[in-house]
Image (cartoon, rainbow, N blue to C red):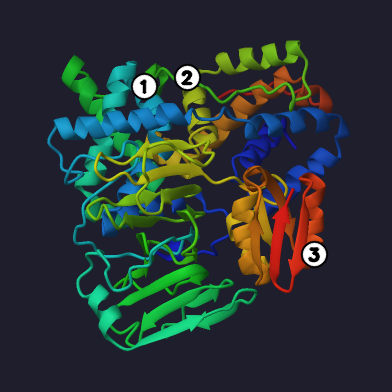
Amino acid sequence: MSQEKFWVLLSKKLSGEAGAEELKQLESLILAHPEWQYAIQNLEDLWKNSLQKDSLQEEDAFMLHLHRMTELNIPFEDEPAEIPAIPVSKARKKRWYWAAAAAIVIVAAGNLFVFGKSLWNHDKSAESLAGKEVNEISTRPGSKSKIQLPDGSIVMLNSGSKLIYNKDYGIDNREVTLVGEGFFDVKKNKEKPFIINTANINIKVLGTVFNVKAYPEDKKTETSLIRGSIEVTIKNRPNDKIILSPSEKLVVENGLVPDKKVRQKNDGELVAAPAGLNTLIAINKLKYSPVDSSVAETLWIENKLVFRDESFEELAMRMQRWYDVSISITDEKLAEKRLTGIFERETIEQALEALKISIPFHYEKNGSKIIIHQ
Amino acid sequence: MESLDLPLLTSMLENDQIKRLLNAIALNNDQAAYKELFLLLHSRLKQFAYSILKSGEEAEELVSDLFIRIWEKRNQLTAIESPLLYFYATAKNLAFNRISKLKRQQTLAPEEWLVQLNSIYFDPEQLMMTEEMMRQIRQAVNDLPPRCRIIFKLVKEDGLKYREVAELLQLSVKTVEAQMAIALRRIGKGMHLDIKTATQTQQTPKNS
């Protein structure tokens, strides 16, 4: 074995070019020379270690590039973006292409559910949903359900949710309406895009697997994207499309807010809507758990009620659905307390006892009614 | 297109990832995919262009030109076989075009390229090395001969396969292999990995 051969083999291994036979050769060579171990380990570490890209600088470069395209009169967007840093485009004829990359979408839709009054400009879909015969599947609080749609797509429906689709689903459209929360595994179909209508936003899915959550009583509509790509339209801004990148979470305040003050704690970028349409929109990064890289937003599928830095008020709302109880918090300060944790097999009593450890409170339980006070 | 049917959870190879993005741009006019592709490749392509053009501004413009081309010819994107190589080869052609316009010079041999290596990055927390050793390694990297440097950069930092580097620089795969071995040996020397004494051979290393 010449030393040239050793270096050829080692560099091929590091570059991922070495075949099985070469790896074996190299390994036996290294085994025979334990004194090389240290330096080889260092070389391997050095190879893997690389300077992180400055993503802000990259974003800037992209903005400059788009600017240059505009100056050179190269059509990229039909109209200038209204929301900075989010690619926004007008509806255009598209051939929908279903990439196999999984998209996980969670939507918590809120407040008023205006059924059949969709502003979604996708031809006859709205009227077909309102006028034709529909299938409606709902789950009671405290229970979950698994549904197979006519095209083989699967929907897991969380507690207290409703999924509506018309009888000819899959024939000339694939459109559903969701109230509550669901996890979708959608079959690939280039010709028929999969569309979800909720009270405040519409989502077009550019991937195949996604998770949707939509509850009428919540204050905000949330769309979280784990992988792939989705397109969101907010109903009172029908001309804008927001394309989410993986690991982004879009939060839309439901209904009209009286002022532009942000009420909830928000550590992400906040973009206010143009004057006249004071819908608050924010795009945040999803937070992955360092332990198992899970995202709190999707853990309900595994029967876990996960909350990370949520107000007691928000958590109580979720616990009502989860345990099929009603909870009222009489003390405003208590309602604003922020909590982090996971409930898995706990009963409602055990869950309340656990919460009492982090924020002291008293409660009275009368059947399924729970009153929480100082 | 078969790359699209890969198991979802396995980490996609970069070429597959680029193919997926190109397909989304080609078939969907997918602007998000376009942006993702730009963010993925911009800084590497810029550095590659810089090595030939030796001007940051020119390199930036070249990458922008390249991506304009991608957008304008998006309906042809699905036919690209080796996407990463396609980007580098196009960048190289655009750079040579610029040079020939400016200096009436047709091409530039890799020996004349100004290659900046930026991934020899030390994290003292992770690497068990002495200051002196790091200095020696830096020195070794800085002293790599030009051709060796560009090959090392394209493989290690830009993620090109030997075959792709060979095609891009019009060399044989064997040459790429040999140059990579030279780079590694020089860096290894900085770590006191001296195979000559270790293997007890008296042979002097051949460098060419």
Q: Report whether residue B39 is seen.
A: yes
Badge 3 amino acid: Glu
Q: Secondary structure at mark 1?
A: helix
| Badge number at residue B50 | 1
Q: Secondary structure at mark 2?
A: loop
Q: Could you say where residue B158 lies in the image, as x and y percent from the top left?
A: 48, 35
Q: Is residue B184 left or right of residue B159?
A: right
Q: In the image shown, does B181 or A2 lie closer to the viewer?
A: B181
Q: Quadrant of residue A187?
A: bottom left
Q: Is residue A260 left or right of residue A23?
A: left
Q: Is residue A176 left or right of residue A309?
A: left
Tag 3 residue: A349
Label 3: few (<14), some (14–19) or many (≥20) C-alpha neighbours in 10 Å: few
Work out which quarter of the rendered image holds the N terminus of chain B and state it: bottom left
Badge 2 amino acid: Gln
Q: Secondary structure at mark 3?
A: helix
Q: In the image shown, does B75 or A228 lie closer to the viewer?
A: A228
Tag 2 residue: B116
Mark 1 in CB contact with mark 3 (< 8 angstroms): no
Q: Chain of mark 1?
A: B
Q: Quadrant of residue A278?
A: top left
Q: Tag count in the figure?
A: 3
Q: In the image shown, does A260 or A214 lie closer to the viewer?
A: A260
